Image: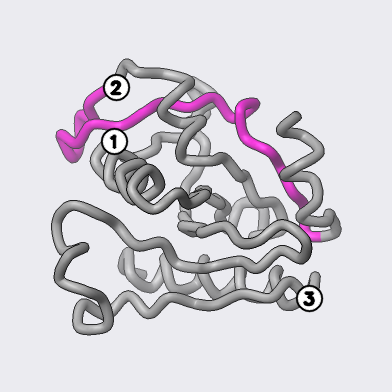
Amino acid sequence: MDISDIGDRTELNFKNWLEKHRIPYLYINQEKETFSSVFEDKLKRPDFIILLENFGFILVDVKYKKINTDYGNFCIDFNETKKYSSLQRRFNLQIWYAISNEESDFKTWFWIPVSKVLELDKKTKTSSKSREEFFPIPAEEFIQISSNDSIDRLFSKRM
C-alpha cells in the first residue's frame, strides 16, 4: 500500500469518526487546482474544517503516524508545522493535528494544536532515512480521544 492510500484510509476513518459523533465538517479537496496560488509554497492546507457549535471552527490535518516505541513520541514534520503556523498567524485560525493508525484500528486519535508543537520543543531532529527535520513530541502531550469519546475532551484537557 502506498503513502497516498494510507493517507486516504486515515482520512476516511477520521470522517467516519466525525459522522459517528455527528460533528459537522467540510472536507478540503487537496487537488492543486482547487486552491489559490497564494498558498503554493508558503502555506499548507489542512484536510478538514470542523464546525463546533457555540465555538466556531478548527482546521484539522489528519495524519497516519505510529509512536516511535524507542522514545515514546510522534515525529511531527518541521516544514509542514512552520507552514501551518504561518497560516494560523496570518489568518487567526486554530489548526490541529489528529493522528491515528491501524494499530489502534483507528479507534484512538491523538490531537495536538500546531501552536503547542512549536511551544513544546524548539529543537528539531533530522530523520536518518529521509533527512527531513521533525519535532519529536512525547505522546503524553497529545489529547487522546477514543472512538467513544466526545470532541469536548479537546477543550476540557487543554485548560
Q: Do callouts 2 and 1 mark residues in contact (Cβ within 8 Å)?
A: yes
Residue holding disc 3:
22
Query: In the image, residue 23 lies at what x, y percent?
Result: 73, 71
The residue at 61%/74% (across/down) is 25
* Element class at badge 2: loop
Q: Identify whether 37 is placed above or below 79.
A: below
What kind of residue is marked 2?
Thr
Asked whether, in this view, residue 152 is left or right of residue 7, the answer is right
Separation of residues labelled 2 and 1 (CA atoms): 7 Å
Q: Nearer the viewer, residue 93 or 43?
A: 93
34 above or below 72?
A: below
**Residue in the foreground of this view, choosing between 143 and 126:** 143
Q: Residues within 10 Å of mark 3 (few under 14, many from 20)?
A: few
Image vertical order of residue 30 relative to residue 122, above or below: below
Span shown in magenta: 125-147
Assess disc 2: are there few (<14), some (14-19) or many (≥20) residues with their C-alpha within 10 Å of its C-alpha.
some
Q: Secondary structure at mark 3?
A: loop
What amino acid does circle 3 point to? Arg
Residue 7 appears left or right of 59: left
**Relative height, residue 136 to residue 80 (above, below):** above
Residue under the point 71% across and 33% down: 158
* Mark found first going from the N terminus, 2 or 1: 1
> Which residue sits at x=77%, y=52%?
146
Q: Residue 135's quadrant in the figure?
A: top left
Q: Which residue is mark 2?
A: 124
Q: Check residue 143 for magenta coloring.
A: yes
- Residue carrying label 1: 78
User: Could you tell me the amino acid type at mark 1?
Assistant: Phe
Q: CA distance from mark 1 to mark 3?
A: 33 Å
